[in-house]
Image (spheres, rainbow, N blue to C red):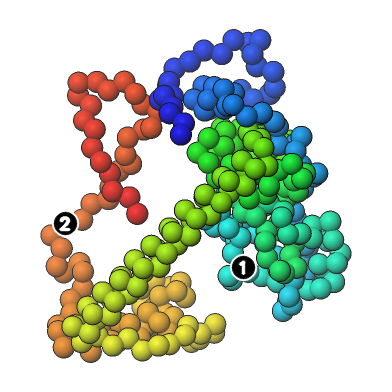
Amino acid sequence: MLKVKKIPQIFIIWSDEIVNSRLDCFYWMPNVYVEKINKSKFAIKKIKDIVESIKSGTTPKQSENPFGESDCYFIRNTNIKDNHIVLKNTKTVKPEIYQKYSALNLQKGDVLICIAGTIGASGVFDLDVKAIFNQNVSRLRFKKEVLPEYANLWFNSDAFLSLIDQNATQATIKYVNNDILGNLPIPIPSPETQSKIVSIMQKAYSKKQEKEADAKKILDSIDDYVLKELGIKIPEVKNKMFFTVWSDEIEGRRIDPKAYLEMPKETIKAIRKSKYKSKKLSDIIAESIAGEWGEDSTFADHTNDYILVNVLQV
């Protein structure tokens, strides 16, 4: 377990230390993880030295009419969730597009990592499907000395996420290129130790999923109980892709389609049919106020007039 100190807000960098074009202070901020990583009992290597290749994806041109019903998937950064690659609501590309972009064909054991937006999120491609990936994702194909599952665990560690975040281009959307990614460090224990780490973490994730499933069942049962007691019966309906809304329905209201889907409309009808009288939320609240962000994690010097409080977040 890494024990780290708080990051100082004021620091000095000498001119001879600046060896590239990065002049932003965030990039040069002392990283409390670096010293800990360098003191690891295992060999520290650069990612580029332990992979066969690092390659970013692309999005086929619209003129190619690439998307259509098929068994060839198009992986985006939004498909990488909770250390896994999820195919739910994933677009598919036509077989000829999959063949045309054969350099982006995924193989079992490839590790995908986000390089734009949610940088650092990663997952091992262990699915029995055909797939290519877009430009917000890089594919890492590791040499035999590194287990993809172990590398994925390292990518999801606080230490690595801190490093990749610091090295990212601080623009509207954070971004790292493959050169930056390839030069980031990774500890390399023996294959036996890697396997042990992966086994322990897989058991931990399995327990986590079981507990989350149990919690969901309890929450669902509570929802069912509350609705039953209120006399609200929401029908099972599916939202339509195409529907009509008359002008008098939207007068003075929202004009985006989401508010007029079948499910929200049926839910409102069911609430109005309840055995209890319903009111608008605005009619029963005395006051509402937006919240504020919590403590700056880099702020360590608390003054006498500084009060530390907890902040609830979604």
Q: Which mark is residue 31?
A: none
Q: Which mark is residue 287?
A: 2
Q: Position of residue 166 (x, y in %)?
A: 56, 32
Q: Amino acid at mark 2?
A: Glu
Image-quadrant location for residue 14? top right
Q: Position of residue 255 (x, y in %)?
A: 43, 73
Q: CA distance from mark 1 to mark 2?
A: 43 Å
Tag 1: Cα neighbours inside 10 Å, few (<14), some, or many (≥20)? some
Q: 224 and 253: which one is in front?
A: 224
Give the secondary structure at mark 1.
loop
The residue that disc 1 covers is 87
Residue in view at x 68 percent, y 58 percent: 125
Q: Nearer the viewer, mark 1 or mark 2?
A: 1
Q: 258 and 36: which one is in front?
A: 36
Tag 2: Cα neighbours inside 10 Å, few (<14), some, or many (≥20)? few
User: From the viewer's perspective, is 299 left or right of 46?
Assistant: left
User: From the viewer's perspective, is 162 left or right of 184?
Assistant: left
Q: 23 and 121: which one is in front?
A: 121
Q: 211 and 306: which one is in front?
A: 211
Q: Is residue 198 above or below residue 264?
A: above
Q: Position of residue 101 (x, y in %)?
A: 83, 61
